[in-house]
Image: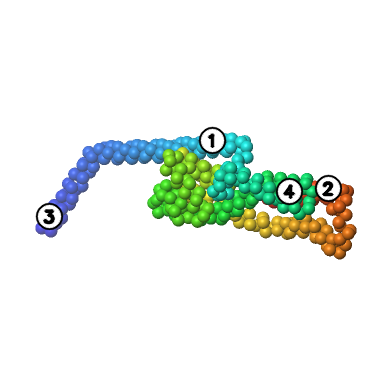
Amino acid sequence: MFGMDITVLAIAGLVALAAAALAYGVLYSRIETEKKAEGRLRRVSASESDRANVKAARDRVSELSKRRKSVQDSLKELEKKQQEKSANAAPSMKKRLVQANLSISLTQFYVFSVLFGLFAFIVILLAGAGLWVALGVGLIATAGLPRWIIGFLIKRRCKQFLNEFPNALDVMVRSIKSGLPLNDALRLIASDGQEPVKTEFRRVVESQQVGLNVPDACARMIQSVPLPEVNFFSIVIAIQAQAGGNLSEALGNLSKVLRERKKMKAKVGALSMEAKASAAIIGALPFIVSLLVYLTSPDYMMILFTDPRGHIIMGASAVWMSIGIFVMRNMINFDI
């Protein structure tokens, strides 16, 4: 009985194995066909994805090249405009009054200059000097001294602007990163900034209110603040408006560059301080020696003021001193 059960199980196993072999033989070709089809589908999908990736990469390269070309065209256009501006004459006195932030008109400035020159002429004439000396002093007081004062005020204001400008750019960067548009960032500086940056950004906002766009309004800032840093700022705004990009990153880099330029100027000033001190000592030495000689021997020095030959000597000495001071000034001053 037990041997018969084993025989039946063996026959059943052989039948099952034969059926499986028959099924595998019948379905083998279909399975292989399906595997090959799946393989071809995978290769086709992989090739399509590769083509899509290649196309996307080509599109990105093309977009970058177009953007680079746009930036280059913008830079060339801005450089052409700057060259045209630099080819023009020096800024007029009316613009210089604006740059000095003086609220007087051009007529008032000329009237003040004439009155100041007339006052200097009368004082020198009453002091006992000759008519020609008084006329020379009056001419210098009329045409020279007021213009020098305007230039001094412009330089002082530009220095104050340059000290505060990087801080204003940092505020703009934080405002833009927090989600504010560029116009609101400009208004923020115009309302809460420090002088003279506050005044200049207020002029930019007022220019926008009368119809100018942001790049043109920022480009006009250089008319009241003649600094290359302001020109850099207007170029960054113009390029961002034409070619797009990350404005906060660009302004942050500009702020970093301005701070590095400031550090470099301070370093150059410290290195050239010894030469400036030497130039000041050399320039003041003739006057100090003349004063000491006059205090010890007045008659020995007064001949330079009473004799015509002394006048010639003093005039020639003044010319040579002026040339020496001019040469030393150019040797110790550096533009960064």
Q: Mark 3 — residue?
A: 4
Q: Nearer the viewer, residue 323 or 134?
A: 134
* Colouring mode (rainbow / by chain / secondary structure / one colour): rainbow
Q: Mark 1 — residue?
A: 77
Q: In which quadrant is the N terminus drawn?
A: bottom left
Q: Which mark is residue 137?
A: 4
Q: Is residue 123 visible?
A: yes
Horizontally, is 103 left or right of 291 in the view?
Answer: left
Q: Earlier in the sequence, mark 1 or mark 3?
A: 3
* Residue drawn at x 43%, y 39% as measured from the top left: 211
Whether the residues at callouts 1 and 4 have beta carbons within 8 Å, the answer is: no
Badge 4: few (under 14), some or many (20 or more) residues near its Cα, within 10 Å? Answer: many
* Residue drawn at x 25%, y 38% as measured from the top left: 30
Q: Earlier in the sequence, mark 4 or mark 2?
A: 4
Badge 3: few (under 14), some or many (20 or more) residues near its Cα, within 10 Å? Answer: few
Badge 2: few (under 14), some or many (20 or more) residues near its Cα, within 10 Å? Answer: few
Q: CA distance from mark 3 to mark 2?
A: 145 Å
- Give the percent coordinates (x, y) of residue 249: 48, 50
